[in-house]
């Protein structure tokens, strides 16, 4: 399985995934449940493509990812809850739950993207 070795590469890859998802569903101010489910499916599809993992294996982590997403949204201010932020979070947290993205690399990505 291939995975980025540098935070910068993770960020670029995540930006590409955000662009692909937004092209598919459109950049919406507010997403409905059906839109969120579509976002989850598209993120899983991108991880499967980028990491060579069957979507069924990735999908097994969905309940943990949704729990983490709930906590993330509680901890994040309303103005910082954009669709690109949510897509980015989902893309990275799925890979974290799968053991692909280490805590150390996640910290590097966070520090590289912090304002």
Image: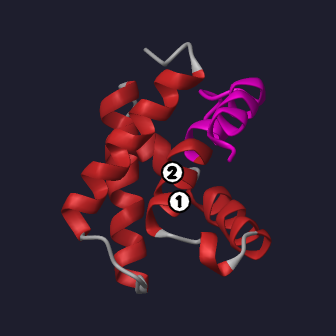
Place of residue 32 in the rendered image (x, y in percent of width and height, measured from the top left): 41, 86
Q: Main secondary structure of the magenta part?
A: helix
Residue in the picture at 53% in, 59% down: 85
Q: Residue furthest left?
A: 24
Place of residue 70 in the rendered image (x, y in percent of width and height, measured from the top left): 69, 72
Q: CA distance from mark 1 to mark 2?
A: 5 Å
Mark 2, Cα crowd under 10 Å, few <14 / some 14-19 / many 20+, is some
Q: Is residue 61 magenta?
A: no
Q: Which mark is residue 107?
A: none
Give yes or no for contact between labels 1 and 2 (Cβ–Cβ under 8 Å). yes
Place of residue 4 in the rendered image (x, y in percent of width and height, measured from the top left): 49, 18
Residue 35, quarter of picture: bottom left
Q: Which mark is residue 88?
A: 2
3 or 64: nearer the eye? 3
- Residue at the disc numbered 1: 85
Q: How is the image coloured?
A: secondary structure
112 or 30: nearer the eye? 112
- Dot 2: element: helix
Quadrant including the N terminus: top left
* Magenta highlight range: 94-115
Mark 1, Cα crowd under 10 Å, few <14 / some 14-19 / many 20+, is few
Place of residue 54 in the rendered image (x, y in percent of width and height, measured from the top left): 37, 36
Residue 102, quarter of picture: top right
Residue in the picture at 72% in, 35% down: 111
Residue in the picture at 34% in, 78% down: 28
Q: Residue furthest front?
A: 115
Q: Is residue 98 magenta?
A: yes
Residue in the picture at 65% in, 37% down: 96
75 or 93: nearer the eye? 75
């Amino acid at each position: 399985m291939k995975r980025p070795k540098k935070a910068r590469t993770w960020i670029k890859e995540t930006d590409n995934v955000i662009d692909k998802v937004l092209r598919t569903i459109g950049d919406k101010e507010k997403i409905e449940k059906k839109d969120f489910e579509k976002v989850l499916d598209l993120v899983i599809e991108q991880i499967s493509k980028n990491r060579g993992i069957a979507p069924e294996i990735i999908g097994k982590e969905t309940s943990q990812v949704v729990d983490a997403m709930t906590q993330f949204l509680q901890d994040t201010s309303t103005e910082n809850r954009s669709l690109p932020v949510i897509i980015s979070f989902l893309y990275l947290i799925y890979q974290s739950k799968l053991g692909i993205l280490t805590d150390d690399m996640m910290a590097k990505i966070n520090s590289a993207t912090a304002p």
